[in-house]
Amino acid sequence: MNSASGPAAVPSTDPLSIAAIGGFHVGGRAYRVAGAPTRIAVFAPGGPARPFDPNGDYVVGQMYVQYVRLARPRAPLPLLLWHGGGMTGVTWEDTPDGRPGWQDFFLRAGHDVYVCDAAERGRAAWFPYPGVMPGEPVLRPLQEMWETFRIGPAAGFADRRPFAGQQFPVAAFDGLARQVVPRWPGNEAATIAAYDALLDRLGPADVIAHSQGCGFALGAARGGPGRIARLVLLEPSGAPDPATVDLSAAARVPHLAVWGDFFAAHRLWREYRAAFERYAQALRAAGGQVDVLDLPAMGIHGNSHLPMMDRNGDAVAALVADWLARHRAAGRLANPPTPL
Amino acid sequence: MNSASGPAAVPSTDPLSIAAIGGFHVGGRAYRVAGAPTRIAVFAPGGPARPFDPNGDYVVGQMYVQYVRLARPRAPLPLLLWHGGGMTGVTWEDTPDGRPGWQDFFLRAGHDVYVCDAAERGRAAWFPYPGVMPGEPVLRPLQEMWETFRIGPAAGFADRRPFAGQQFPVAAFDGLARQVVPRWPGNEAATIAAYDALLDRLGPADVIAHSQGCGFALGAARGGPGRIARLVLLEPSGAPDPATVDLSAAARVPHLAVWGDFFAAHRLWREYRAAFERYAQALRAAGGQVDVLDLPAMGIHGNSHLPMMDRNGDAVAALVADWLARHRAAGRLANPPTPL
């Protein structure tokens, strides 16, 4: 796989010509609080204590999208980047060791890029009063990330001793602790509704999803190529039982799965992968296309669960960009964002 | 004030030539959780239920920064945009009615722009386990924003009847409910520490702060022009008693305060403004410079507490950009962000 390590995989650092950059919220539903007690608080340094009444009207479940549209996009559809569990769109920005991330790579590859914060996370916000969020949130500790992201053996965490050949920039591993945000297990319906609202506005779109985000993207792709035109699944954390879903429309959406290394060391990841492979087999049986980049089998060793942050992240991105280009249908240009 | 409404205030829509775009976290401190019970949860749609152990190592109090650096910046220093209370950097992106915001304006005006999410908000994250966040968070209801942001009289909220001449795009007012995030009154020390860490990395910088953010920026400016070179305060929500702080270094930092309209209708805002004016008088007495754009007194009527979202937001931005340009010292070019 020379193409994954040769000069062609290194993106240009020439200036980018940008038509527009900004952000917006989409989706969500009205929610009213009534009967809650008033509080007293100081809201600005040096300001007076004043009453605060939480009763009133809100929107809950919205999501946030940061967009960068090129002056001369070469890809016909917008590219949406969907992060994984406990993460935000920061996943796609600078790597923990300060290299440009996949947002930058795919802009330079000619895509209009939309980086999402799914409902409940990051700039999408969450709701602090009763009745909306399900149960208690959890936040990933570093030790859990070390294991779940397949950086190294559990026993290697204390002295940051990774798997041999690890591509993740381990010296910057602790920086990941700054990127994670609380999540609410069981709140998937809100995120699915928000992604639906986003695709209502922007679709059809190409989507690159990571980990938990792949579950949301697989669901959206079951809406057919009018929703997601081409779907890239980076390390999907499982997939639904194919007997429980209708794959007829998804069969018209090309899927690409990308797998890193070190599955032998992690039973949970083998289970996730087996669930995805059952789904992929059913999708193929329904006439669909599921391509796979099994990186170690291609001679690209050492990738973690976070290939977009790994030291060879640009090389993996180049393989994904190449797949997208080869599967690009003649499509319409994305419309610019319009007011909500 | 023809300059505030004439064609000169309308920024170009030509493509922007961008050297780099991305985001990073800065600041925060290590925190360890011990003795907490393990939970059971399903973490991915279709995935298995599995135990989650919250005990372990975290970083708390970090902040998030999104940067866009121009290929050929005309301003010598980075421009940092600091949002107000209960908000995030989204404040500076598209307005609620979908126009380009001040991030776009100041990029087109030649500034490298760094949009911040202060500690606890947006992509900066917050901490869901005990011992870090002070007390309970609050989230602004729409009614509170209607009054505090001086959109209209309290009695006008139900049918969205604003003050006469209101510049805020009232038809899109409800979209503000999607932008707000929970805040913790009393958590100011974490935000101050995070902004200090940011200025350690990027300073000296020019800063435009809004509302609560102005309190943090006034504090940083008391570190002198090696921290904040020029400070723009959009509608500061008060200021400390000048007898309690040392203004000697701040006296070497040019300050500009910008005030909108409708103060007569709002006692709290008159108190905030009076507190700021006492601070400004003391700063001037210490040899400092505090310029003021009192927009209604200049013939620019109808601005809310959110001038960056108001329909004449570009015109107000042009006045700020002009002030920054006139007070620009010969300074060094900003260094690009370096790895943490």
Image (tube, coloured by chain):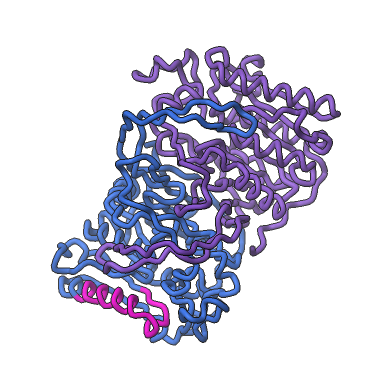
Chain colours: A blue, B purple
Instruction: Answer yes or no: is residue B157 visible.
Output: yes
Q: Name the residue located 25 percent from the left edge and 74 percent from the top edge.
A: A275
Q: Is residue B305 above or below residue A228?
A: above
Residue visible at 67% across and 44% down in the picture: B79
* Image x and y of residue B21, in percent: 57, 55
- A46 magenta-colored: no
In the image, A93: left or right of B228?
left
Q: Quadrant of the C terminus of chain A?
A: top left
Relative to A273, is A279 on the left or the right?
Answer: left
Q: Nearer the viewer, residue A127 or A81?
A: A127
User: From which residue to which does the magenta span run?
Assistant: A258-281
Location of residue B63 with respect to B12 vertically, above or below: below
Residue at 51% over, 69% down: A309
Whether residue A317 is visible to the viewer of this picture, yes or no, is no
Q: Residue furthest front?
A: B35
Is A159 rendered above or below residue A250? below
Q: Main secondary structure of the magenta part?
A: helix
Residue in front for this viewpoint, A262 or A315? A262
Q: Residue at x 43, y 55 (%)?
A: A182
Residue A180, percent from left and from top: 48, 59
